[in-house]
Image: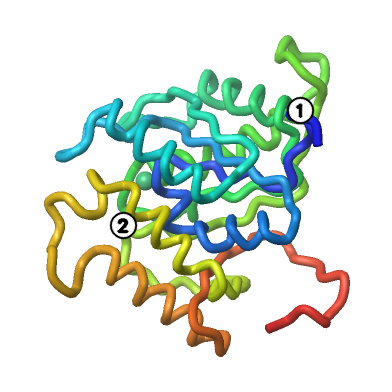
């Protein structure tokens, strides 16, 4: 498939590692089923206590190699200062017109981290802007059909998801991808159970339990979700 072919799914993440934490198993599942998947990180995620831009870039490259996505880009917006302003909206809309994803994955709108709250609003606004005509934005108008929200980890909310994806066959590879982010999930974190990765595994196990499988990832959609058939329900 050509490098410029439209994406089926684009995961938009405030920081490198958010896509892996919240949707890593689903990304691997989509890939295994032949979908064309991309990730767009909005910022480089720095500064953090144990990271640097170079370390974060290396960690992201290693995780991306495990996920095997077709495209991973960074929009270069400001970490910690992410806002859904007009300039950021325009930058993101231009990328959407170029990558032409059918479905967007975005952070759930309620979060303790202001960057995640901003990212959620920014994706919604840019989705609409991407379809504008009579604009000086490059590229053809494009409107992603759906936004599916993933759940970030900064608030211990229990929001009822619209659906849970069975990621059991992909969970171990997801953990391998997460472990690439040493500066975020391993250094400075507890080294004996419960480690941060243990906690993430427990949460995936819980969501798997809700649908009767080993591991799951929850998602929410504001708009209705259509199914082509009922045969693939877990
Ligand atoms: Zn984040």
Quadrant including the C terminus? bottom right
128 over 156 or under it: above or below: above
Query: Quarter of the image holding residue 98?
Result: top right
Q: Quadrant of the N terminus?
A: top right
Residue at 43% from the left image edge and 73% from the top image edge: 204
Relative depth, front residue between 114 and 179: 179
Give percent across and percent down for residue 85: 49, 25
Q: Position of residue 233 (x, y in %)?
A: 73, 81
**Crowd class of label 1 (few under 14; some 14 to 19; many from 20; radius 10 Å):** few
Q: Identify the residue at image location x=54%, y=36%.
A: 40
Looking at the image, the residue that sits furthest to the right is: 228
State the mark number for residue 154: 2
Q: Residues within 10 Å of mark 2 (few under 14, many from 20)?
A: few
Answer with mark 2 or mark 1, whichever residue precedes in sequence.
1
Q: Which mark is residue 4?
A: 1
> Where is residue 193 drawn, in percent x and y?
17, 74
| Residue that appears at 38% across and 74% down | 203
Number of marks in picture: 2
Q: Is residue 27 above or below residue 125?
A: below
Q: Secondary structure at mark 2?
A: loop
Give the number of the disc on residue 107.
none
């Amino acid at each position: 498939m050509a490098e410029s072919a439209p994406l089926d799914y684009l995961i938009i993440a405030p920081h490198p590692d958010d896509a892996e934490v919240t949707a890593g198993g689903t990304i691997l599942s989509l890939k295994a089923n032949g979908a064309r998947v991309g990730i767009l990180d909005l910022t480089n995620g720095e500064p953090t206590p144990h990271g640097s831009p170079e370390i974060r870039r290396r960690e992201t490259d290693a995780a991306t190699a495990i996920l095997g996505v077709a495209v991973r880009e960074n929009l270069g917006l400001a970490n910690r200062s992410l806002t859904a302003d007009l300039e950021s909206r325009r930058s993101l809309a231009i990328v959407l017109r170029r990558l032409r994803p059918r479905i967007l994955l975005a952070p759930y709108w309620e979060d303790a981290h202001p960057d995640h709250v901003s990212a959620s609003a920014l994706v919604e606004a840019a989705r609409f802007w991407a379809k504008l005509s009579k604009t000086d934005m490059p590229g053809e108008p494009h409107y992603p059909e759906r936004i599916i929200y993933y759940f970030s980890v900064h608030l211990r909310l229990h929001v009822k998801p619209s659906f849970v994806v069975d990621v059991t066959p992909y969970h171990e590879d997801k953990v391998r991808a997460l472990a690439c982010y040493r500066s975020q999930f391993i250094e400075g974190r507890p080294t004996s159970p419960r480690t941060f990765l243990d906690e993430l595994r427990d949460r995936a196990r819980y969501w798997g339990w809700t649908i009767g499988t080993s591991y799951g990832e929850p998602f929410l959609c504001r708009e209705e979700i259509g199914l082509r058939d009922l045969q693939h329900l877990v």
